[in-house]
Image (cartoon, helix red, strand yellow):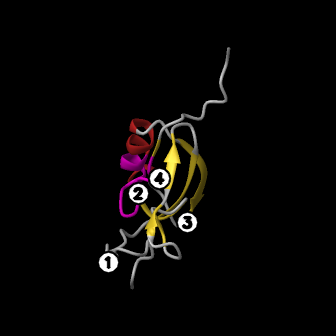
Amino acid sequence: MLGNGIGGFEFPVPDFIALTYREALKRLDSGRLILGALIVDRNITDTLNAFVYQQSPARFDAEEKKTNRIRQGQTVDLWIGVRQPERKMDSTSDKLQQ
């Protein structure tokens, strides 16, 4: 019998913000997650060393003030750019403060 590829165990959505794309791929693989959409800024010349500045699903749900959950086999969308975002996050938001 074949399954749909989605695991039954939920765990917190990993935080990919400020990782290089190469590091993010390793984290996706270790969590048995699948890369969904990859949104690449047009000025990138080295994709693997570009930095993740946005992800979906986000690690935190700002409205519910809790950590989002995901299952193995689900997808994560990543946005990558040339500049590494500064990590200034509070405990209730996944939005980087500029």
As drawn, 86 above or below 47: below
The CA distance from mark 4 to mark 3 is 10 Å
Residue highlighted by disc 3: 41
| Region in magenta | 11-24
Judging by the rendered image, the residue that carries numbered circle 4 is 47
Q: How far apart are marks 2 and 1 (CA)?
A: 14 Å
Asked whether disc 2 touches disc 1, contact meaning CB atoms under 8 Å apart, the reply is no
User: From the viewer's perspective, is residue 53 above or below residue 69?
Assistant: below
Q: Where is residue 48 in the image (x, y as percent from the top left)?
A: 42, 49
The residue under label 4 is which amino acid type?
Thr
CA gap between label 1 and label 4 equals 24 Å
Q: Work out whether mark 3 precedes mark 2 in sequence or the reverse, and give the earlier one.
A: 2
> What amino acid is at disc 1?
Lys
Which mark identifies residue 28? none
Q: Separation of disc 2 and disc 4 at Cα? A: 15 Å
Disc nearer the start of the sequence (1/4): 4
